[in-house]
Structure formats: C-alpha cells, structure tokens
Amino acid sequence: MKHKAIYLVGIFGALLCLMHACKKERNNGDDYTPPEPFTLQLPPGFPTPEYNFAGNPLTRQGVELGRFMFYDYRLSKDSTVSCGFCHQQFAAFGHFDHALSHGVSGRQGTRSVPVLFNLIYQKAFMWDGGVFPLERQPFTPLTDPNEMGANLSELLPKMQADPRYRKMFKAAFGSEEITSDRMFKAITQFVATMISAGSRYDSVMRRLPGAQFTEEEQAGYATFLQKCAACHKEPLFTDLSYRSNGLPVVPFLNDMGRYRITLQGSDSLRFKVPSLRNILKSSPYMHDGRYFDIYQVFDFYDRGKKDPVYTDPLVARNIPLSDVEKRQLYLFFNTLTDYTLINNDALREVLIN
C-alpha cells in the first residue's frame, strides 16, 4: 500500500513537472499559434476583386490589428488624428461636415475625404488614382503633412516600444517585429472588410422576400438608368474611370486632377467617378466638397456652367432634370444607403486608452 501511494505521488509530480515545463515553454515565447483565417463574404453579383489576397490573406488577428491602428490617434504626428477621424463610419467612412480634408495642427488638404468601402474592387486610389495597390494607400494619409503627418522612422520605434502593439503584431504575423509592410498589410486587411452591399437596393435586386421599390423610387431608378448609369455603373455605382464633369477650377486650389499624376493634358480636371452608394450619408460632394446638398449636385448637372474644354462629352450638354425627377432620384439614392455598413459593430471605432 505504501509503495502504491509513493507511485501515485510520483505520477502526480511528473504531471506537475510536465505542466510546468509546458507553461515555461509558452512563457519563453514559443506559444505562437497561427492566426485564424478570416472569411470575407463577397456579395453575389459583384465583380471579381482586384485585390490579390494571396499576398496578404485575411486573418482575424490581422483584421483586428488593422482596426486598432485605423482608430489609433497616436499614429499621427501630434497624436490628435486617426484614420477614423476623417473616415467616419456614420458617413460611410467619408467626412460629414468638412469640405476639405484636415489633419494635424489644424492643417487643411485640397480635396474632400473620399468614402472607404468596396476598396478591394478598385485598382487605384485617391481622387486622381495616384496611389496603388491598396496596401500602399495608407502610406499617403499617414505621412502627408496636411493629414497625419507621421514620420515612419519615428513612428515604428514608438510602436515597437508599446507592449500591446508587440503582442498584436505577434498574433497577426508570428513575431513582435513591427514594420511598415506589416502595418499597411494589417490596415489593408481591415479596410478590405468594408463591403457595402447590404442596401435596400441590393435587397430588391436580389429579389429578397418583401423587398421592392416604391413607385417613386422605381421612377428614380429609371431616371438613374437613363441619365446617370453611363458613369455610375451598377453594382458599384461607379465605372472607376477618371472624368471631368465640368466643374470650374477653384482658383486658390488650382487642382488639375489626374493631370498631376500623368502630366497628360487630356487628364486635366479629371477625377475618379465616385460611387453613389451611401451618397446621402456622405456629403459634401465633388472632389473639393463644394456642394453640401445633393440637390445642388442635381442642379449642377441640370443647368450648371461647364468647363468648355475638358468636360466629358457625357455631361457637356447638361443633363435636364425636372423637379419631379430630382425628387425621384433622391428617393432612389436613399435606397443605396447601406445600414449594415454604417452600423456594423465589427467596423466600429476602437477606444484607445
């Protein structure tokens, strides 16, 4: 009996030693668990994404890290501005109340804040398409002196010294090393999840039970197809081209659009055709935010004076819109509001302590 008791104690002790050894091994940093794959639900009827996920597969930890950085004001030069500061979720990740982008030290940019959704379907970014691919897009606002104004040579060591960041980078990428490549990949993973395909329009198009347009919305859809769809193609509601809609240049901005990128005269005053999805939630409008009301936009296309040289032929002759048609268009545009995007808890702001 005595030998049996010793034997049991011995086994128990061995188990404790084994558990301790395992725990010690984990504490030595060998407890790395590969990140969990994140499955992105792509909407039916949408085109094939332009973004190549093979080089940056989505993981739960990568998306979480990207979300944290998206809302971390400490990444800006003076710790006052985050990506989410300008890209507000309730405004479809545009900026609701400022015509032009603004950043650290009260500085102001020269263009309005573009909305952020369905980015994986785009080849190039910004109003002039001057940034690509998607992983490089965050670099511009992060380092632009009029936006976040960060210096990567200062920012990376600052992040490396933060235990929480080291932990999150290890969970996402396997080690605590923080590099700009990893930063931008993680932010890309987060913004890639900003998919807008859950509006009432989408429900109608998918013939979901009970989903239908009202009579006026249907009339607005017909007007849209006749007078807007040539540039704002479904289902993204943009053809992603660069066009001049005829807006006269604002002298103090003197923004020549895509010409700045290509230096081709034919690209003068051309800007990316914006999506109409969530359009009623994402004012102000146009590349310089000059219009705060969608009816001002309707009036511009209806009878606004267009630049005589560079205006796209599709809008050069104006697009006549009656008051009834404007109201019907407004009601149809309202069906493009995607509340599943602007109320998505997974995209909501993270509070940074």
Image (spheres, rainbow, N blue to C red):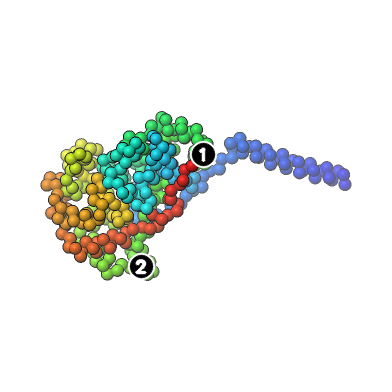
The crowd level at tag 2 (other Cα within 10 Å; few <14, some 14-19, many 20+) is: some
User: Number of labelled discs?
Assistant: 2
* Distance of label 1 from label 2 (alpha carbons): 45 Å
Q: Position of residue 195 (x, y in %)?
A: 38, 53
Give the residue furthest to the front.
106
The crowd level at tag 1 (other Cα within 10 Å; few <14, some 14-19, many 20+) is: few
Q: Position of residue 137 (x, y in %)?
A: 35, 41
Q: Position of residue 323 (x, y in %)?
A: 19, 63
In this figure, which residue is indicated by the disc labeled 2?
211
| Amino acid beneath label 1 | Arg
| 298 relative to 50, above or below | below
Q: Secondary structure at mark 1?
A: helix
Of the numbered discs 1 and 2, the one sitting upstream in the chain is 1
Which label sits in the foreground, 1 or 2?
1
Left or right side of 118 for 311? left
Identify the residue at horizontal 42%, vertical 44% (top origin).
71
Left or right side of 86 for 8? right
Check contact, mark 1 vs mark 2: CB within 8 A: no
Give the residue furthest to the right.
1
Identify the residue at horizontal 59%, vertical 37% (top origin).
30
Identify the residue at horizontal 35%, vertical 37% (top origin).
104
For this rendering, which residue is in front, 117 or 143?
Answer: 143
Residue 187 visible in image: no
In this figure, which residue is indicated by the disc labeled 1?
164
Question: Picture quarter containing residue 149?
Answer: top left
Give the residue furthest to the top.
153
Residue 180 visible in image: yes
Left or right side of 60 for 263? left
Question: Picture quarter containing residue 209?
Answer: bottom left
Identify the residue at horizontal 38%, vertical 32% (top origin).
151
| Amino acid beneath label 2 | Ala
Q: Position of residue 205 (x, y in %)?
A: 33, 63
